[in-house]
Amino acid sequence: MIWNEQIECMDPQQLKGVQSERLAKLAEYVYSNSPFYQQRFDQHKIKPDSIKTIEQITDLPFTTKIDLRDNYPFGMFSVPQKGITEIHVSSGTTGNPTVVGYTKEDIKLWSDVMARALCCAGAEPDDTIQIAYGYGLFTGGLGFHYGSLEMGLTTIPASSGQTKRQLKIMQDFKPRILACTPSYALYMAEQAKELGIDPRKSSWKIGIFGAEPWSDSMRDEIENLWDMLATDVYGLSEIIGPGVAQECPHKDGLHIFSDVFFPEIIDPATDQPVEPGQDGELVITTLTKQGIPLIRYRTRDIVSMNIEKCRCGRTSPRISKIKGRTDDMIIIRGINLFPSQIEEVLLSIEGTQPHYQIVVDRKEHGLDMVQVQVEIEEQLFSDEVRKLNELKAKIQNGIEGVVGLRVDVKLVEPKTIVRSEGKSKRVIDKRKN
Amino acid sequence: MRLKQISVFLENKKGRLQDVCSLLGSNGINMRALTIAETESFGVLRMVVDKSDQAIDLLRKNDFAANVTDVVAVEVEDKPGGLAGILKIISDNDVNIEYMYGFVEKFSDKALLVFRFEDTDHAQRILNENGVSIVAEKDIQGL
């Protein structure tokens, strides 16, 4: 079924009208409610009442993650704090995390787009869903939760982890839908086998997987292991969380809910739009958000866009799976990690900046693992093993404090991390398959 | 008198200890005592060599993380209870040992042990006061 057929299957010309109307309102709204955007508009000599059509969006300035960091915590909010009903937090590049606030209306919007996403994946109103994304500051758990309530599904807020319990819930409550990260779906299959449970006989028939990059071959593996349909969900907390775009059972791109999240694909080098089908950076404008509306937000995700109508009947444009990043952000189990955060921790520990490398790997049928290799330089080296182990623990705890992720730290000999073209390669991501 | 101990950081991979030994060997540096402290992923090689200044330069030039630490080498009666006597003096005087290991060879009928103390000055004073024979740098040159 299609949750909001009127809007999701709207004639593209008519949709443009809706988008234009919303953009005009948004320009007025941010100009009068956000000191940040008022200043931005003034700098660029933009009169909000001159914005009348969606095509004019390219006249507006971009917004970046740096803007969010510089205005930490509430400087980007367009409503006073008393109007904010919920706050979520994700990782920032350095220093402060990224904070987003939702008004009551924003939560309604989130519930609506997540209900659209669930339907798009194939959920039916009498389904039961097991939500194994983390509940908390991370948007994954609660985003699915709101959408599931909106759609009237039987909601199991399992949250992440405790695999044995997840499997027991699956066996006893028989949910047809599973929502979690794709690597966790693989991991659970492995655990199920160890416990003598045949994954192919599980009740889960539809998976909604996201919060980390994954490939088509990984999809094949999951579908094969669990005998289920595995769909991709896209989102980022700055825009709303999960519910920005979702694959339908045709698995031919993710339907982006463009009446509320207007997408552009640009060449990150020139900032100019690219032709449909070409790879570029996804830029999103939140057309109707109140708490923290963002204009032309640079997601840093590289995708391509397909504007053809889908066989499922939806007319909204479809984005490809994420093909890469324009920055060096790594996503692990829904947590964003930037090499700059690791640098910050290393610098704070010994006042030196040792060479390091981040190795990300997906264990066979397992979770994504991060190892941070740090070269031992003279000033860090001690003849006492205890002190070296202390150093290791300090780095590990420091990273956990900043990133919120427990990583493996490995001390390595000097000059063993490969330097290429003058600077060392900071990230080795082996999760290509 | 103290000895200069050289410690080297070694990752647990094949051939690293041999790399150190052949580097020192081909430069005419002789190892007198050595031990390896190991963990799951790395080890620390500690050794006393005949030409410590030259050895440390050489190791650093070859991209090893290496340090120099003061240690004390002590002559111990090579008979049952010989070490116990020295350890009694040490513990009676609240001297803390970080670690210890033995020499490869001896230059009298006594055994040679290397001690890394928490407080080397204090330890040395106690040993001297108790008439324990400490080995000097020049003694090991001729071994």
Image: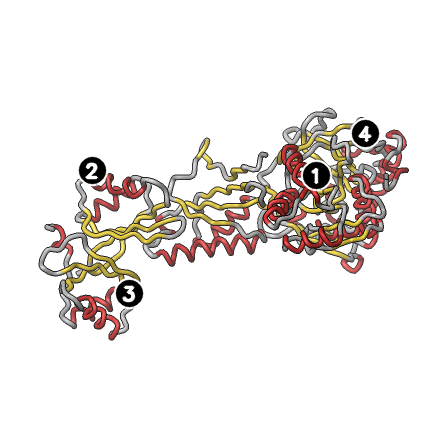
Secondary structure beneath disc 1? Answer: loop
- Between label 3 and label 1, give the one nearer the viewer: 1
Q: Residue A301: where, in percent of width, then height?
A: 66, 36
Residue identified by numbered label 1:
A227
* Spatial CA span between label 3 and label 4: 74 Å
What amino acid is at disc 2? Ser
Image check: B119 left or right of A30? left
Nearer to us in this view, A214 or A373: A214
Nearer to us in this view, A69 or A400: A400
* Spatial CA span between label 3 and label 2: 33 Å
- Between label 1 and label 2, give the one nearer the viewer: 1
Query: Mark 1 and 2 residues: CB-CB less than 8 Å, in contact?
Result: no
Q: Residue A264: where, in percent of width, then height?
A: 74, 33
What amino acid is at disc 3? Ile
Query: Mark 1 and 4 residues: CB-CB less than 8 Å, in contact?
Result: no
Give the class, few, some or many, for how many residues have Cα within 10 Å of label 1's Cα (few <14, many ≥20). some
Residue identified by numbered label 3:
B97
Question: Chain letter of disc 1?
Answer: A
Q: Are marks 3 and 4 on the same chain?
A: no
Residue identified by numbered label 4:
A310
What amino acid is at disc 4? Cys
First in sequence: mark 1 vs mark 4: 1
